[in-house]
Amino acid sequence: MPALAEGTTVEVCTPFGAPSGPYTTAELPRPDGPPLETVFLARHGHGHRLLPSEVDYRANVHGFKQLGVTHLLSVSAVGSLREEIVPGHVVFPDQFIDRTRARASTFFGDGVVAHVQFGEPTTEPFRKLALAAAQRAGATVHDGGTLVVMEGPAFSTKAESHLYRSWGASIIGMTALPEAKLAREAEIGYAVLALATDYDCWHQAQAEVSVLAVMATVAHNVELAQRAILELVAAMPVTTAELPYPRSVEHATMTDPAEIPAAARERLDLIVGHYL
């Protein structure tokens, strides 16, 4: 992204392993305030080397937290499960269905039990701000909808695709979970800018999804996504008092603080230490 070209590369170590790669930090302009400190990470690694199941989501989100991130926009390619969501359109889902099965989905465990609320898995004021930014950037935008997150890396069978449609789902992808759950535990506001690249495999009049089709649509719309991000940056308020992030861990810990092992306290210091 040209706006990040003059940014700084930052290597981060986390208690949960190595992130997908180095982060890029940069100050992006806001017309009505100081520049916004922005952090970018390619979740699949440089050159797209990591399968969705190989991404260390815990390390990635913890790294964002270490760098002071308060709101996280996930830019993702997805398949459309609805006729009206045409490849090239942008969706800002507000619900998820978790069909993953081989991913660490919590920072807690090993001595600390916590249960965060996840009924509304995206941060609504932030989602709405990002949606309006995409509209200003010229995108055809769909407000809300359910995102099915599958394990991958293979695409769906037709039976699965029709099942998800029968559930009322709008789009399908492979990376928003456990990313969104971990962002909630890290008290980071979260929203998804989902770029529809294909009709999955349910649409009889369209060719079955392929990597070539996905990449062609992404390449055609990458500039649109970048414009949407710059519009969002311009609209971000100066303080988190104006755009709060979730205080989701404040009352989530079940474990008696006196029983939490020292190693667990150290590992979770950035996640729950301010409440303990």
Image (cartoon, rainbow, N blue to C red):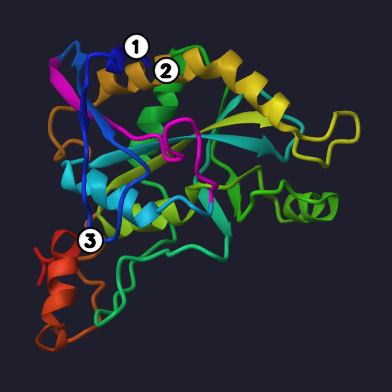
Task: Tell me which amino acid carries mark 1.
Answer: Pro
Residue 192 is situated, as x and y percent measured from the top left of the image, at 46, 38
Residue picked out by circle 2: 226
Mark 2 or 3, nearer chain start: 3
- Mark 3 element type: loop
* Residue 138 x, y percent position in the rendering: 51, 12
Quarter that holds the C terminus: bottom left
Q: How many marks?
A: 3
Residue assigned mark 3: 15
What is the magenta range? 33-52
Judge whether residue 76 can be spotted in this image. Answer: yes
Residue 49 at x, y percent in the picture: 50, 39
- The residues tagged by marks 1 and 2 sit, at their Cα atoms, a distance apart of 9 Å
Nearer the observer, disc 1 or disc 3?
3
Amino acid type indicated by mark 2: Gln
Q: Is residue 67 above or below residue 249?
A: above
At mark 1, the secondary structure is helix
Vertical placement of residue 125 versus 37, above or below: below
Residue 56 magenta:
no
Secondary structure beneath dot 2 equals helix
